Image: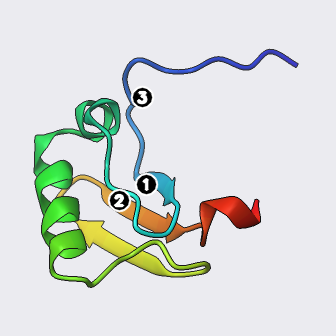
């Protein structure tokens, strides 16, 4: 099986991103998901609507795609 890391997100209906508890979006993640979703995600994190708690899910929409953030919980539990 061949695995690789993308430098850009391919066209998709839904984008999933898993974050640890209290983790913020990295500059690379922001670039991959695009300015619109990055701005919305940062707003939701700052508003404490999403903090990366285990099992937490936040879905953001625009006319073309859905962006789903999934909480992974505390990083040291992994």
Residue 74 location, quadrant = bottom right
**Residue in the image at 56% along x and 20% along y:** 5
Q: Against 55, is 70 above or below? A: above
Within-10-Å neighbours for mark 1: few <14, some 14–19, many 20+? few
Contact check, label 2 and label 1, Cβ < 8 Å: yes
Which residue does the numbered mark 2 point to in the structure image?
A: 67
In this view, the residue farthest toward the right is 1
Whether residue 62 appears in this view of the structure is no
Horizontal relation, residue 20 to residue 59: left or right: right
Within-10-Å neighbours for mark 2: few <14, some 14–19, many 20+? many
Q: Position of residue 2 (x, y in %)?
A: 80, 15
Nearer-the-camera pick, 61 or 7: 7
Numbered circles on residues, count: 3
Q: Nearer the viewer, mark 2 or mark 1?
A: 2
Q: Against 13, is 63 above or below? A: below
Which is more N-terminal, label 2 or label 3?
3
Q: Against 44, is 28 above or below? A: above
What label does residue 10 carry, if any? 3
C-alpha gap between disc 2 and disc 1: 6 Å
Q: Against 16, is 55 above or below? A: below
**Residue in the image at 20% along x and 38% along y:** 34
Which residue does the numbered mark 1 point to in the structure image?
A: 14
**Residue in the image at 32% along x and 55% along y:** 24
C-alpha gap between disc 3 and disc 1: 10 Å
Which is more N-terminal, label 1 or label 2?
1
Residue 60 location, quadrant = bottom left
């Amino acid at each position: 099986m061949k695995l690789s890391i993308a430098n850009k997100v391919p066209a998709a209906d839904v984008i999933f991103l898993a974050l640890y508890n209290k983790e913020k979006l990295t500059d690379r993640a922001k670039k991959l998901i695009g300015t619109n979703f990055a701005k919305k995600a940062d707003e939701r994190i700052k508003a404490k609507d999403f903090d990366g708690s285990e099992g937490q899910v936040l879905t953001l929409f625009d006319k073309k795609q859905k962006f789903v953030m999934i909480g992974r919980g505390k990083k040291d539990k992994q």
